């Protein structure tokens, strides 16, 4: 079953006319090795690649989060605390964890891993780069594609339902222990919410207020869809035509591939080069400031 439980941590400054939101997603680092074309774009966008081993990931997480706080850019960070999809095997492991820790067994979600979540919240909060946490629950009332193979076979979900709850950071606990309990409490609510969804009318309860900006009209959404469809139809064909007709396009294409492959082998990713440059210039500024103070 696809991921159904998401936390979105965001620092946003926006109005209806201008939205400046950077989007960062935690990805498994082996994807960075095997899915080159997709992951090169993710490196440029400074996605966070992880090893799924906390001992290896903690330092990298800390460096990247401090970088985001230092540059003071609006941030969206998606976190999947369950760490994996809901399958028979992962559900069994989650139930074993529940038995060992005296917790309730879940049917529709897995018990969350709170270590990374609490660490990220604490780092962003200390850097004054966290406004709110959005608790997002996803449900599929009809067909549920389990793997990419289902999507390739055309088994797309006919409907996808989202339940979003916003928690201003002022309402979120500050201590690590209370934050872990807070996360676990949200998962209890998700289990009950999904149970009502799948055993009931296949829809979420309508609670709270849904605020939709005036610019988000159906006509605007349709226009964006049409423009996107047109772009992604014309752009690949245009790129293919350039490669076939012009040698400079082929040389440019080959040069870009070589550059990205080499930097991946030497430095481990473009986002790590960006991070290293930031840390270098930050250290230089501190050094210069120290010299000025001594004078």
Image (cartoon, rainbow, N blue to C red):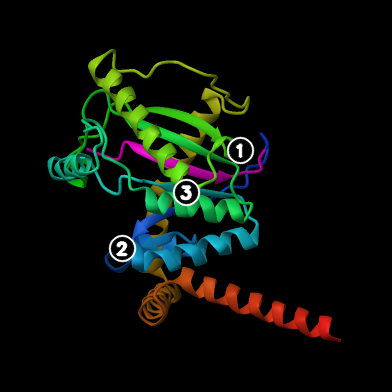
Query: Mark 3 — residue?
Result: 176
Point out the frontmost of discs 1 and 2: 1
Task: Look at the numbered disc 3 and give the secondary structure of its residue.
Answer: helix
Residue 177: x and y in percent read 44, 46
Name the residue rendered at 24%, 44% in the picture: 85
Q: Say whether disc 3 or disc 2 marks the residue closer to the N-terminus.
A: 2
Query: Mark 1 — residue?
Result: 170
Residue 209: x and y in percent read 55, 19
Residue 53 is labelled as: 2
Name the residue rendered at 57%, 28% in the picture: 216
Name the residue rendered at 26%, 14% in the picture: 200
Q: Quadrant of the N terminus?
A: top left
Task: Look at the numbered disc 1 and give the secondary structure of its residue.
Answer: helix
Measure how far apart labels 3 and 1 are at the Cα level.
15 Å
Q: Which residues are magenta?
A: 1-14
Residue 295: x and y in percent read 86, 86
Picture quarter containing residue 89?
A: top left
């Amino acid at each position: 079953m696809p991921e159904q439980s998401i936390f979105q941590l965001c620092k946003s400054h926006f109005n209806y006319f201008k939205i400046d939101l950077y989007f960062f997603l935690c990805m498994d680092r082996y994807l960075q090795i095997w899915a080159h074309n997709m992951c090169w774009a993710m490196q440029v966008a400074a996605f966070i690649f992880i090893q799924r081993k906390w001992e290896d990931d903690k330092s990298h997480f800390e460096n990247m989060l401090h970088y985001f706080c230092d540059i003071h850019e609006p941030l969206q960070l998606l976190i999947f605390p369950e760490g994996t999809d809901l399958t028979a095997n992962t559900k069994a492991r989650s139930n074993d964890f529940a038995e060992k820790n005296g917790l309730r067994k879940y049917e529709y979600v897995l018990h969350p891993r709170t270590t990374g979540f609490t660490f990220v919240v604490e780092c962003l909060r200390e850097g004054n780069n966290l406004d709110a946490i959005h608790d997002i629950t996803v449900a599929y009332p009809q067909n549920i594609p389990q793997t990419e193979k289902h999507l390739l076979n055309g088994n797309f979900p006919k409907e996808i339902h989202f339940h979003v709850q916003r928690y201003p950071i002022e309402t979120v606990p500050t201590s690590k222990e209370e934050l872990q309990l807070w996360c676990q409490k949200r998962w209890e609510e998700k289990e009950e919410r999904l149970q009502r969804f799948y055993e009931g009318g296949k829809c979420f309860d309508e609670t709270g207020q849904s605020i939709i900006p005036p610019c988000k009209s159906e006509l605007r959404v349709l226009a964006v869809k049409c423009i996107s469809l047109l772009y992604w139809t014309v752009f690949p064909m245009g790129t293919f035509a350039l490669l076939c007709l012009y040698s400079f396009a082929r040389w440019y294409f080959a040069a870009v591939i070589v550059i990205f492959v080499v930097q991946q082998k030497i430095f481990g990713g473009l986002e790590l080069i960006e991070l290293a440059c930031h840390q270098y210039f930050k250290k230089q500024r501190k050094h210069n400031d120290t010299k000025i103070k001594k004078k």
